[in-house]
Image (cartoon, helix red, strand yellow):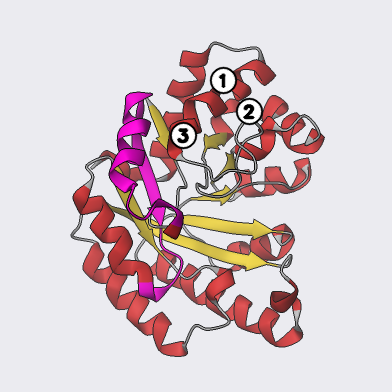
Amino acid sequence: MWIDSHCHLDAAEFEGSTKTVVQQAQAVGVTTIVVPAVERANFAAVAQLAQEFALCRYTLGIHPLFVPQAQEDDLILMREAVQAALSDPQFVGIGEIGLDYFVPLLRTPEMRVKQERFYSEQLKIARDFALPVLLHVRRSQDMVLKHLRRISVPSGIAHAFNGSVQQANQFLAANCKLGFGGAMSFTRALQIRRLAQELPLTSIVLETDAPDISPAWLHPAANNPAQLPRLGQVLAELRSMDLQEIAAQTSANVEQVLPRLKN
């Protein structure tokens, strides 16, 4: 059993081929794909995917890359959407939310303030409904953690983690798991590979972030969820462990951090 804890299956790259992509993932043993929303406009799309494909689950959130065009009303509508989604067993949490200090537009003083507001307000939604969060932490680990300490949520995943050991431990202390995917397949990604090798296996979840963060054997082509078992093989080799043990533990980790998956 393999669980892809983060896959943008509604992305334009998969348009017209979604069924094939899902079937290919199932054929290699992927049993669950978590599809995060990125803006109000795709809330319905991710929910629809979860209705169409039994292995899909979804989360609702406003991604930092979509904060520039987001409106204040989006936060009100998101809270309403989350409340309505609680009756849907395919709905598993809040995400993708967080902060991004890599994209130049998002580093301006105005956008930093807006990003932090949207992130903190979405954390409050997660807190108020006792839901886990999928966190975007690109060059923003410390600030993401700062808000997470202030607004406590039940659990979460630091998606595409690329921080220090100290930051990793702080996320673990906040009841978060750490997402590893295509980046660890590149031999030059020394820090990520070291973390994947040395952190407790109970702290790691696997993800593709498809169609993004393609692994070394696919780059620069678009990623897809069928790559997850091979990413598991990379992790198994880094840790000198049995592949089935990697599959079992990383899947259990996702279920622990996203408890609605077991509904």
Task: Find disc 1 in the rendering and name its residue.
Answer: 233
Q: Residues within 10 Å of mark 1 (few under 14, many from 20)?
A: some
Image point (18%, 60%), residue name: 87
Q: Which type of secondary structure does the marked residue at label 2 adopt? A: loop
The quadrant holding residue 55 is top left
User: Is 136 left or right of 46, judged from the image as shown?
Assistant: right
User: Is 119 left or right of 59, judged from the image as shown?
Assistant: right
Task: Find disc 2 in the rendering and name its residue.
Answer: 200
Q: Quadrant of the N terminus?
A: top left
Q: Which type of secondary structure does the marked residue at label 3 adopt? A: helix
Circle 2: residue type: Pro
Residue 121 visible, this orientation: yes
Circle 3: residue type: Asn
The quadrant holding residue 200 is top right
Q: Residues within 10 Å of mark 2 (few under 14, many from 20)?
A: few
* 172 w.r.t. 196: above or below: below
Q: Which type of secondary structure does the marked residue at label 1 adopt? A: helix
Image point (36%, 40%), residue name: 21
Circle 1: residue type: Gln
Q: Position of residue 105 (x, y in %)?
A: 71, 78
Task: Find disc 3 in the rendering and name its residue.
Answer: 253
In this picture, which residue range is highlighted in magenta? 13-41
Label 2 and label 1: CA atoms lie apart by: 17 Å
Image point (47%, 40%), residue name: 224
